[in-house]
Image (spheres, grey):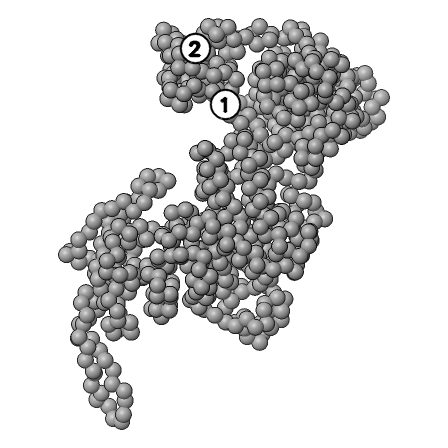
C-alpha cells in the first residue's frame, strides 16, 4: 500500500495499522474522543498547549472515505432552538443613523466578547450585515465589539487562525514549507471587519484598526499564551478598495489564487482577493523562521518588487472555474489547486488560435471577456450582465458593438473552431447529428422571430428556430455549425424595414430547415475534417424521404421516424389502376398489399425482441428491448427501397422509438444499437449550452450577432472538452 499523504503528515502502513488497533481498543468511544486519543498518542499539540484533535479528526475522516478504517457512526445532535424575530430585534437594539466627526465618538472602547453573553450579539451583527455573513470560527480566535464613548456600538472585528496556503504571504515572509508548519500559528487573520451600516463617520475604520492592533497582541497572549508576529487579511477588490487597511499601514503583497478551505481539501471559488500584511515586530521574519536578509523590506515599496503576474488586477476576473459553476458539467471537471495554472495556460493558448480573425486588439480582449462570461456563474449571460460582472458599466456599449456591428470575420472563427474540434474529437467511428433547437422570444424585432412551433414550449408561440450540426465519437462531442431558420414571411415586402434593422444579408433567400441541414452536412462532408460512418436525425428530418435521399451516399443514415411511417414486410405487387372517366388521364399505380405503420408492425408477436444494454449512463446501464427487420419503405403509398427498420422500446413497453437506416446488410446489430443512442450527444450539447453556457440567454436582434453568439457557445463548449482531455493526460502521468 502506498503511503497516505494527508496535509502535513505522511501515514505509513504501520501508522494505519496502529490507528485500526486504536479504534478496536477503544470501540466504545465516539469520533471526537478517538481523535483526542490519537492526538495524545502522537504527542500532537498546538503552540498554546492544546491538542490537535481537530487535525486528527480530519485524518480519520479521510481514511474512512478511502475505506481504510471503519469509524463509529456520527453522533446525532439536537437542532438548536431558533430565536424568534422579536428576540432577535431586542438583541440588536438597532440605533438610528449616526453621522458625525471622529472626535465626537473618541475615545473608543474595545470589548472582547468571546465566551460572554455579548458574543451572541457579535454573531448576529456579522450574520446580518457582513457580506460574508457569519461562520463558526474554529481554532484560535478573538471577537471584539467597538463602542463609542457614550456606549453606542460602532463596529465588530474578528481575528482567527491564518490560512494554510497563501503564496503571496509565504513569499513575503520567505519561509519554507517546514518553517510554515512550525510557525503558522504566529500569523493571525483578520477574517471579519464590520462598520455597522448606519454609522457614517469619516476615518473611523482605519482608526479602529490601528487602535485594535495595539491591544490585540496582549489579548492574544492572555488567551493563548503566545504572541503573534504578523497579521493578514483579504480584500475583495470587487467591493472594496482596501482604503482603511492602507491608511492603517497594512502592506499590499499580492493576490490569492481563489481557493478556500473546505473540509480536508481546497475548493476553487474563482474570486481572487488582495492580500494585505501587517508586521507586528521588526524581526517578524526571524521570529517566523526565516533568518536571511535576502528579501526586500516589507514596507509600501515591497509591492514594487512583486512580479506583474502576481500583482492584483482590479476589474479582471479569473477565467476558469467560479463559485457556483457546475463542476460536473460534462465533460466533468475535478479541479485541484495545482490544476489552475495549467487551466490558465490552456485557455490562453486556446484563445490565441482565434486572434487572427480579429482586426483590433480591443476585439481580442472583448472576445475573451464574452467567452469568459459564458463560462461564469452569473445568472443571466447576456451582454449587459457579462459586461457589468467582468468589466464595468462603461464597457456595456463596447461589448454590444463588438457582437452586433463590429467588423471581424465570424466565419473565419467558426472555421478555426471546426479545425480545433477535428483535432479533439475526429475519429473514423464518428457520427454526424443534425437537430433543431428553438428559443422563445417575447418581442417581434429580433431576426427570424415568428409564431411557429416551439419545441421547448411544446406549442405554437413566438420564437426563433435554429438548425444545428454536431459531431460525436469515442473521443467526445461538439457542436460544429448553426443556421438561423428565417420564416418565409420575413422575405415579404412588409418585413423589408425589419430585415434592414436586423442586418440580414441582402442576398439571403428563404430556405427550409431541411435545406439548411443539408447545406451544413454537405459543407462538413466536403471539408473532410470529420470522418463519419453515420448521420443521425430526429423524426422532423427523418420523415422526409427526399432529405434522406440527398445525404452523402458514403455515409449511412440512422433516422428517427414517426410511429405513423408506413412500410411493408415484403415488396408488394403493384398494378396500374383503371380509369373509368372520359378523356385522357395518366394511369396511376397502386399496391395490392396494404402497408402497415411501424407502430402496428411493432405489435407483431413474431418479432424477436432482445434485451440489451445500450450504454452506460450516469445512473447506471441504459437497458432496452430492441429488434430490427428488413422492410420496404413506402413513398407516396408506393414501394421504394429495402431498408432496415430498427425499433427500440423501454423495458416496461411504454415508450417506443422507430428508426430507418440504409446501412448495408452486413451491419452488425451491436453497432446499430450503439448508433441508436448517438442522438444523445447533440441533445446533451443543447442542455449544457442552455443550462450552463447561456446559449438561450442572448438578447441580440441582428442576424450576425445571433450567429456570433452561437459560435462563442461552441467555442466555450469545446474548451471544456479540451480542459478535460488535458487534465486527464496530466493525472495519468
- Residue 174, picture quadrant: top right
Residue that label 1 marks: 264
The residue closer to the viewer here, 20 or 120, is 20
Residue 397 seen from this side: yes
Judge whether 267 appears above or below 572 on screen.
Answer: above
What residue is drawn where x is 45% and y is 9%?
38
Query: Where residue 321 sits in the image (x, y, percent)?
Result: 55, 38
Picture residue at 43% right of the left edge, 56% below the top: 530
Q: Viewed as shown, does residue 423 lie left or right of 535?
A: right
Q: Quadrant of residue 107 in the image? A: top right
Q: Secondary structure at mark 1?
A: loop
The percent position of residue 298, horizontal first and vertical second, equals 75, 22
Residue 34, disc: 2
Residue 121 vertical position relative to residue 712 in the rendered view, above or below: above
Residue 121: which numbered mark, if any?
Answer: none
- Label 1 CA crowd tier, 10 Å (few <14, some 14–19, many 20+): few
Foreground mark, 2 or 1? 1
Specify which label sits upstream in the sequence, 2 or 1.
2
Give percent across and percent down for residue 518.
43, 66
The answer to whether residue 140 of the structure is visible from this angle is no
Residue 658 vs residue 365: left or right? left
Q: Quadrant of the C terminus?
A: top left
Amino acid at each position: 500500500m502506498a503511503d497516505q499523504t494527508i496535509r502535513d503528515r505522511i501515514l505509513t502502513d504501520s501508522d494505519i495499522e496502529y490507528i485500526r488497533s486504536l479504534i478496536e481498543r477503544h470501540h466504545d468511544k465516539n469520533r471526537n474522543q478517538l481523535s483526542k486519543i490519537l492526538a495524545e498518542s502522537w504527542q500532537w499539540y498546538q503552540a498554546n498547549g492544546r491538542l490537535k484533535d481537530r487535525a486528527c479528526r480530519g485524518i480519520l475522516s479521510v481514511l474512512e472515505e478511502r475505506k481504510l478504517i471503519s469509524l463509529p457512526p456520527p453522533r446525532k445532535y439536537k437542532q438548536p432552538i431558533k430565536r424568534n424575530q422579536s428576540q432577535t430585534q431586542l438583541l440588536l437594539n438597532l440605533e438610528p443613523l449616526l453621522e458625525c466627526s471622529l472626535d465626537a465618538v473618541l475615545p473608543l472602547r474595545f470589548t472582547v466578547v468571546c465566551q460572554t453573553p455579548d458574543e451572541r450579539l457579535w454573531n448576529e451583527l456579522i450574520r446580518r450585515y457582513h457580506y460574508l455573513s457569519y461562520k463558526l470560527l474554529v481554532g484560535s480566535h478573538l471577537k471584539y465589539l467597538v463602542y463609542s464613548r457614550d456606549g453606542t456600538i460602532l463596529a465588530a472585528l474578528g481575528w482567527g487562525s491564518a490560512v494554510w496556503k497563501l503564496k503571496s504571504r509565504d513569499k513575503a515572509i520567505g519561509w519554507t514549507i517546514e518553517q510554515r508548519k512550525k510557525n503558522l500559528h504566529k500569523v493571525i487573520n483578520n477574517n471579519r471587519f464590520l462598520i455597522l451600516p448606519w454609522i457614517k463617520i469619516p476615518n473611523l475604520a482605519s482608526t479602529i484598526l490601528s487602535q485594535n492592533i495595539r491591544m490585540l497582541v496582549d489579548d492574544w497572549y492572555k488567551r493563548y499564551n503566545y504572541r503573534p508576529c504578523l497579521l493578514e487579511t483579504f480584500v475583495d477588490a470587487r467591493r472594496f478598495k482596501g482604503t482603511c487597511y492602507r491608511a492603517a499601514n497594512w502592506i499590499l503583497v499580492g493576490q490569492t489564487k481563489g481557493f478556500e478551505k473546505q473540509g480536508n481539501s481546497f475548493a476553487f471559488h474563482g474570486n481572487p482577493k488582495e492580500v494585505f500584511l501587517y508586521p507586528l515586530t521588526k524581526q517578524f521574519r526571524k521570529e517566523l523562521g526565516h533568518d536571511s536578509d535576502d528579501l526586500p523590506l516589507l514596507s509600501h515599496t515591497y509591492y514594487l518588487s512583486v512580479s506583474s503576474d502576481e500583482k492584483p488586477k482590479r476589474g479582471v476576473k479569473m477565467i476558469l472555474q467560479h463559485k457556483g459553476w457546475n463542476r460536473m458539467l460534462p465533460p466533468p471537471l475535478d479541479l485541484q489547486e495545482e490544476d489552475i495554472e495549467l487551466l490558465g495556460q490552456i485557455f490562453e493558448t486556446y484563445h490565441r488560435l482565434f486572434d487572427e480573425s480579429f482586426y483590433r486588439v480591443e476585439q481580442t480582449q472583448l472576445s475573451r471577456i464574452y467567452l469568459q462570461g459564458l463560462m461564469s456563474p452569473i445568472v443571466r449571460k447576456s451582454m449587459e450582465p457579462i459586461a457589468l460582472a467582468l468589466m464595468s458599466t462603461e464597457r456595456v456599449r463596447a461589448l454590444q458593438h463588438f457582437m452586433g456591428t463590429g467588423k471581424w470575420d465570424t466565419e473565419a472563427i467558426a472555421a478555426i473552431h471546426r479545425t480545433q474540434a477535428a483535432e479533439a474529437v475526429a475519429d473514423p467511428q464518428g457520427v454526424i447529428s443534425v437537430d433543431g433547437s428553438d428559443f422563445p422570444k417575447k418581442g417581434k424585432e429580433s431576426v427570424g422571430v415568428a409564431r411557429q412551433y416551439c419545441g421547448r414550449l411544446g406549442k405554437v408561440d413566438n420564437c426563433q428556430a435554429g438548425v444545428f450540426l454536431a459531431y460525436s465519437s469515442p473521443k467526445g462531442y461538439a457542436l460544429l455549425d448553426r443556421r438561423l431558420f428565417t420564416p418565409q414571411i420575413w422575405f415579404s415586402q412588409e418585413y423589408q424595414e425589419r430585415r434592414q434593422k436586423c442586418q440580414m444579408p441582402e442576398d439571403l433567400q428563404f430556405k427550409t430547415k431541411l435545406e439548411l441541414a443539408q447545406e451544413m452536412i454537405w459543407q462538413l462532408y466536403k471539408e473532410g475534417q470529420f470522418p463519419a460512418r453515420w448521420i443521425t436525425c430526429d423524426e422532423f428530418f427523418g420523415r422526409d424521404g427526399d432529405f434522406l435521399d440527398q445525404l452523402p451516399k458514403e455515409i449511412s443514415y440512422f433516422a428517427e421516424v414517426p410511429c405513423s411511417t408506413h412500410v411493408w414486410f415484403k415488396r408488394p405487387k403493384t398494378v396500374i389502376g383503371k380509369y373509368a372517366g372520359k378523356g385522357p388521364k395518366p394511369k396511376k399505380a397502386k399496391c395490392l398489399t396494404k402497408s402497415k405503420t411501424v407502430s402496428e408492425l411493432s405489435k407483431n408477436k413474431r418479432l424477436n425482441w432482445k434485451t440489451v444494454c445500450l450504454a452506460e449512463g450516469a445512473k447506471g446501464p441504459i437497458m432496452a428491448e430492441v429488434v430490427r427487420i428488413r422492410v420496404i419503405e413506402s413513398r407516396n403509398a408506393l414501394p421504394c427501397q429495402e431498408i432496415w427498420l430498427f425499433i427500440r422500446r423501454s423495458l416496461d413497453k411504454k415508450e417506443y422509438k422507430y428508426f430507418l437506416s440504409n446501412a448495408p446488410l452486413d451491419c452488425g446489430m451491436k453497432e446499430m444499437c450503439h448508433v441508436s443512442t448517438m442522438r444523445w450527444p447533440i441533445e446533451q450539447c443543447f442542455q449544457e449550452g442552455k443550462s450552463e453556457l447561456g446559449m438561450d440567454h442572448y438578447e441580440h436582434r441582428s442576424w450576425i450577432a445571433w450567429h456570433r453568439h452561437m459560435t462563442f457557445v461552441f467555442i466555450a463548449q469545446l474548451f471544456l472538452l479540451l480542459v478535460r482531455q488535458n487534465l486527464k493526460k496530466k493525472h495519468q502521468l
